Image (cartoon, rainbow, N blue to C red):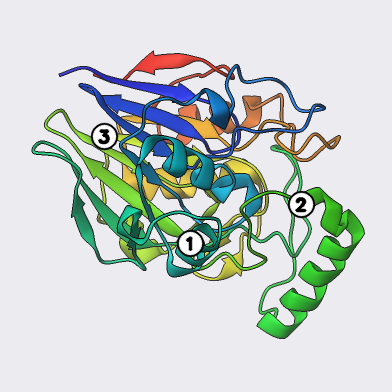
């Protein structure tokens, strides 16, 4: 069995498992100011499934185009499904989840869905190597005020034409089970400690930008502190880092070109974990 993975920036991947084509998030129609990834949703001619981690534009956008062009089934939250339904995706193509489900993709491949957490976009963040502290115990009311201010500053025109919700819809992680091994797909820097301690994937696709969210609170530390902690829990054989490119076409959002602090800390604390580098638009063979 041959399993390949293509990275199209942000947290969007195409996983191909012996001819089964599974998109992990679907955001590929990027602003002109973003680095090109070599593909748009209009180029996608074949897809069997799309697994979408949450309903924000940089993850859900394009799912409607791919589903309507190819007939692919989308596995996503109820909020993501609502957005896609309003954009013309047929009900039979929408498999909803909130965590705790297991779906059959074909005779050989299944996927388990787990509840997850979004990174703390309502508070301060920094590039790797720069720890950030504070904002512990912030209420949902305070978070919403900050998020609304951020959205107003960006302007509604930014989101025009994209499948998007101001709500995450409840982030989801996916554990893809194949005869060769398991692949964890996480599309935002957040996790529940009790869940991650028991997943033990062979390959972990992890977000690597923002302020990490551990059990509902912002990490008191750096990006590398967060990633090392989750790798200590997950104990994967291989890790692939995403979500760190300039996917929004805005300077510093996040555009982390130097992951050296993350790589050095992983090598120091979890030397048995292999970090697999990926270029935008690049491909690796997992098995």
Circle 1 residue: 85
Residue located 55% across and 56% down the image: 87
Disc 2 from disc 1: Cα separation:
17 Å
Dots 1 and 3: beta carbons under 8 Å?
A: no
Q: Quadrant of the N terminus?
A: top left
Circle 3 residue: 202
Mark 3, secondary structure of its residue: loop
Residue located 45% across and 36% down the image: 69
- Residue 138 vertical position relative to residue 260 in the rendered view, above or below: below
Specify which label sits upstream in the sequence, 1 or 3. Answer: 1
Residue located 74% across and 54% down the image: 132
Disc 1 from disc 3: Cα separation:
34 Å
Asked whether the viewer can see residue 188, the reply is: yes
Specify which label sits upstream in the sequence, 2 or 1. Answer: 1
| Disc assigned to residue 60 | none
Q: Position of residue 77 (x, y in %)?
A: 43, 64
Nearest the eye: 106 or 217: 106
Q: Position of residue 287 (x, y in %)?
A: 23, 18
Mark 2, secondary structure of its residue: loop
**Given this view, does label 1 or label 3 mark the residue nearer the observer?**
1
């Amino acid at each position: 069995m041959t399993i390949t993975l293509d990275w199209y920036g942000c947290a969007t991947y195409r996983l191909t498992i012996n001819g089964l084509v599974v998109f992990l998030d679907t955001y590929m129609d990027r602003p002109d100011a973003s680095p090109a990834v070599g593909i748009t949703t209009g180029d996608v001619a074949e897809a069997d499934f799309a697994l979408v981690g949450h309903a924000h534009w940089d993850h859900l956008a394009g799912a409607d185009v791919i589903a309507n062009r190819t007939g692919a089934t989308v596995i996503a939250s109820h909020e993501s499904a609502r957005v896609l339904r309003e954009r013309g995706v047929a009900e039979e193509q929408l498999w909803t989840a909130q965590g705790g489900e297991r779906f059959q993709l074909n005779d050989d491949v299944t996927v388990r869905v787990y509840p997850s957490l979004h990174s703390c976009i309502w508070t301060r963040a920094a590039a790797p190597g720069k720890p950030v502290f504070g904002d512990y115990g912030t209420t949902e009311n305070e978070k919403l005020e900050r998020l609304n201010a951020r959205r107003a500053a960006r302007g509604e025109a930014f989101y025009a034409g994209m499948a998007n919700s101001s709500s995450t819809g409840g982030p989801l992680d996916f554990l893809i089970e194949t005869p060769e091994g398991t692949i964890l797909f996480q599309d935002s820097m957040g996790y529940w400690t009790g869940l991650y301690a028991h997943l033990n994937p062979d390959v972990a696709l992890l977000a690597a930008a923002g302020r990490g969210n551990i059990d509902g609170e912002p990490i008191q530390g750096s990006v590398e502190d967060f990633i090392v902690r989750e790798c200590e829990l997950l104990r994967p054989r291989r890790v692939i880092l995403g979500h760190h490119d300039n996917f929004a076409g805005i300077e510093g959002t996040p555009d982390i070109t130097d992951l050296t602090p993350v790589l050095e800390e992983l090598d120091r604390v979890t030397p048995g974990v292999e970090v697999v580098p990926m270029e935008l638009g690049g491909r690796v063979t997992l098995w």
